[in-house]
Image (tube, helix red, strand yellow):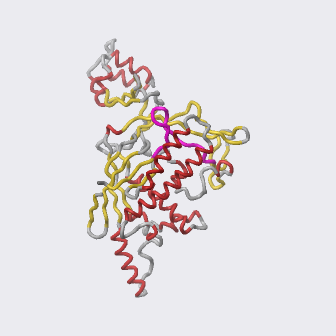
């Protein structure tokens, strides 16, 4: 583990992030990759276009009937005749290989839209520090709620973490993780869902429904720099103690429960301990869910993969964290509201009304769906990563 001390206020630690199951982080206003505009699927490969190169070649080319190719291309796109693109390029004597930016193997044809990963301005795909921080926050919320509880759950966030100017999460900062382009791939995602059957519920995959995304594949990874302001916390708490002793403390300088989650002696070890404890609980509940509803094909492989991830949570020098797209309601909220992941199937969540297409009305939520990788990868849940102390 590379550990750097920035002054006496922050401990900066370089960790290694390894993807255990596919991770997708898109952008809020993401530009989808459109078939026959941004890519084609040919011979088991998703072929991404180099749009700049394509426009350059079109600018100097002509169609078979001697029309300027660039203008004809613009008219083709404006008319929405995307399916004619490959034939049009052939008519302009432009080979697909000339405009190929990247090829990704995919055994099953993708949807006609692919959700891309978020990237830096230099085009490097990243796992944003904000996504990692959000996942850590869910872990800490779970721990603090278990310790202290809050009667009014609408005020739980402020009560447990502190207000915006004096918040536990301001002491923790993970940076973006840049991942090599060759560790990115395309995957199809199926929707594992529950359906009423014979007076109970059974699982299956939603027919004719799947998503295609660009994702970091298992084994991908990069360096994660994590800053914990343990020195600042220690300094403020000493000052706080002195002011309180002198009866001159108008308001607390540090969050009320900060010592429950941040250790000034071993901040990384403490975070790893809390993350692993939480993830073990979360995975146990997910395994129980899939075991209870395992009628869908290949569910046993999903369970086996979860068991592999759970086994990694017993390593004190590493932790397993779940984040980003497809991590699900329970992981996003901190998994604190329900004792398991099956209870809302039979007793829906009265505090969360969701739209029911069959009745065209809002009804209490049942958290009964999961996003699972399709046939190109081992059937597995999304979003698990391992953080390790660098050697």
Of residues 331 and 283, which is closer to you in this image?
283
Residue located farthest toward the top when viewing the structure as drawn: 65
Of residues 131 and 381, which is closer to you in this image?
381
Residue 170, placed above or below residue 183:
below
- The image position of residue 150, as x and y in percent, is 58, 67
Residue numbers of the magenta segment: 366-383
Of residues 380 and 94, which is closer to you in this image?
380
- The image position of residue 219, as x and y in percent, is 37, 42
Q: Residue at x 32, y 27 (%)?
A: 100
- The image position of residue 284, as x and y in percent, is 54, 52
Residue 369 within the magenta-colored segment of the rendering? yes
Q: Residue at x 34, y 16 (%)?
A: 90
Would residue 276 appear left or right of 230 to someone viewing this image?
Answer: right
Residue located farthest toward the bottom when viewing the structure as drawn: 246
**Overall secondary structure of the magenta stretch?**
loop
Residue 93, placed above or below residue 269:
above
- The image position of residue 184, as x and y in percent, is 36, 38
Q: Residue at x 33, y 15 (%)?
A: 63
Residue 331 within the magenta-colored segment of the rendering? no
Of residues 366 and 266, which is closer to you in this image?
266
Q: Quadrant of the N terminus?
A: bottom left
Residue 221, placed above or below residue 189:
below
Question: Which quarter of the figure has residue 262?
Answer: bottom left
Would residue 362 appear left or right of 373 to someone viewing this image?
Answer: right
Q: Residue at x 47, y 72 (%)?
A: 256
Would residue 310 appear left or right of 224 to someone viewing this image?
Answer: right
Q: Quadrant of the C terminus?
A: bottom left
């Amino acid at each position: 583990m590379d550990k750097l001390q920035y002054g006496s206020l922050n401990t900066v630690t370089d960790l290694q992030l390894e993807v255990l199951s596919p991770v997708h982080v898109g952008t809020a206003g993401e530009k989808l990759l459109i078939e026959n505009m941004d890519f084609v699927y040919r011979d088991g490969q998703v072929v991404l276009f180099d749009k700049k190169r394509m426009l350059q070649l079109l600018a100097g080319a002509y169609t078979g009937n001697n029309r300027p190719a660039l203008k004809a291309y613009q008219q083709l796109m404006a008319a929405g005749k995307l399916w004619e693109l490959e034939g049009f390029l052939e008519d302009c004597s432009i080979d697909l290989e000339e405009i190929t930016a990247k090829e990704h193997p995919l055994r099953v044809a993708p949807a006609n839209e692919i959700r891309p990963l978020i990237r830096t301005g230099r085009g490097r795909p990243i796992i944003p520090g904000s996504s990692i921080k959000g996942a850590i926050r869910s872990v800490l919320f779970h721990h603090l709620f278990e310790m202290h509880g809050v009667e009014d759950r609408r005020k739980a966030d402020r009560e447990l973490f502190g207000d915006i100017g004096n918040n536990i999460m301001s002491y923790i900062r993970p940076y973006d993780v840049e991942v090599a382009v060759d560790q990115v791939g395309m995957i199809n995602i199926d929707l594992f869902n529950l359906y009423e059957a014979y007076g109970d519920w059974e699982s299956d995959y939603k027919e004719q429904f799947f998503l295609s995304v660009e994702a970091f594949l298992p084994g991908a990874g990069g360096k994660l720099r994590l800053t914990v302001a343990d020195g600042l916390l220690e300094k403020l708490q000493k000052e706080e103690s002195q002011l309180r002793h002198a009866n001159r403390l108008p308001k607390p300088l540090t969050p009320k429960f900060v010592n429950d989650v941040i250790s000034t002696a071993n901040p990384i070890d403490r975070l790893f301990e809390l993350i692993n404890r939480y993830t073990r609980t979360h995975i146990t509940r997910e395994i129980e869910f899939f075991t209870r509803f395992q009628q869908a094909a290949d569910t046993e492989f999903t369970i086996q993969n979860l068991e592999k991830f759970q086994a990694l949570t017993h390593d004190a020098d590493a932790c397993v964290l779940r984040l980003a797209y497809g991590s699900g309601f329970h992981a996003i909220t901190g998994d604190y509201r329900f004792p398991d992941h099956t209870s809302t199937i039979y007793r829906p969540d009265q505090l969360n009304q969701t739209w029911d297409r069959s009745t065209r009305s809002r009804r209490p939520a049942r958290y009964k769906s999961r996003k699972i990788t399709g046939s190109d990868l081992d059937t597995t849940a999304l979003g698990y990563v391992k953080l390790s102390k660098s050697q």
